[in-house]
Image: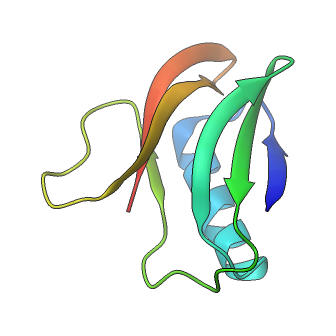
């Protein structure tokens, strides 16, 4: 497991681009979003292999056909915000 720190000032599109890049670069799926010490945390399971579909983070409801990864408060554009990760 690798825990990445995302800049709390990033907007949602930037955060989602970062997640996609990291899932492919680190060859593992996002398994958890969260926050710690004023930053957004992203847990990547580097032992699991590249996911068939990249995770997406939303502040709304995921699509009905999506599999939810988890929901937590993360920083989006500098504001602690309830968000859900899914794929």
Looking at the picture, how far across and down is residue 83, in whole percent? Answer: 45, 30
Relative horizontal placement of residue 1, taking residue 87 as reference (left or right)? right
Looking at the picture, how far across and down is residue 33, in whole percent? Answer: 61, 40
Task: Determine the image quadrant of residue 29.
Answer: bottom right
Picture layout, residue 45 above or below residue 76: below
In the image as oriented, which residue stretches furthest toward the left? Answer: 64
Looking at the image, which residue is at 53% across and 39% down? 12
Looking at the image, which residue is at 63% across and 59% down? 19
Looking at the picture, how far across and down is residue 24, in whole percent? Answer: 67, 80
Nearest to the observer: residue 11 or residue 75: 75
Q: How many marks?
A: 0
Looking at the picture, how far across and down is residue 76, in whole percent? Answer: 60, 26
Picture layout, residue 16 above or below residue 6: below
Relative horizontal placement of residue 76, taking residue 56 as reference (left or right)? right
Looking at the image, which residue is at 52% across and 27% down? 72
Picture layout, residue 26 above or below residue 19: below
Picture layout, residue 3 above or below residue 8: below
Looking at the image, which residue is at 60% across and 60% down? 30
Q: Quadrant of the N terminus?
A: bottom right
Q: Quadrant of the C terminus?
A: bottom left
Nearest to the observer: residue 75 or residue 47: 47
The colour mode here is: rainbow
């Amino acid at each position: 497991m690798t825990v990445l720190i995302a800049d709390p000032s990033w907007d949602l599109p930037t955060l989602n681009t970062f997640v996609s890049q990291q899932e492919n670069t680190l060859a593992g799926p996002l398994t958890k979003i969260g926050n710690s010490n004023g930053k957004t945390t992203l847990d990547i399971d580097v032992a699991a292999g590249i996911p068939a579909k990249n995770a997406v983070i939303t502040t709304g409801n995921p699509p009905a056909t999506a599999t939810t990864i988890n929901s937590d408060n993360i920083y989006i554009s500098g504001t602690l915000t309830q968000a859900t990760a899914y794929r």
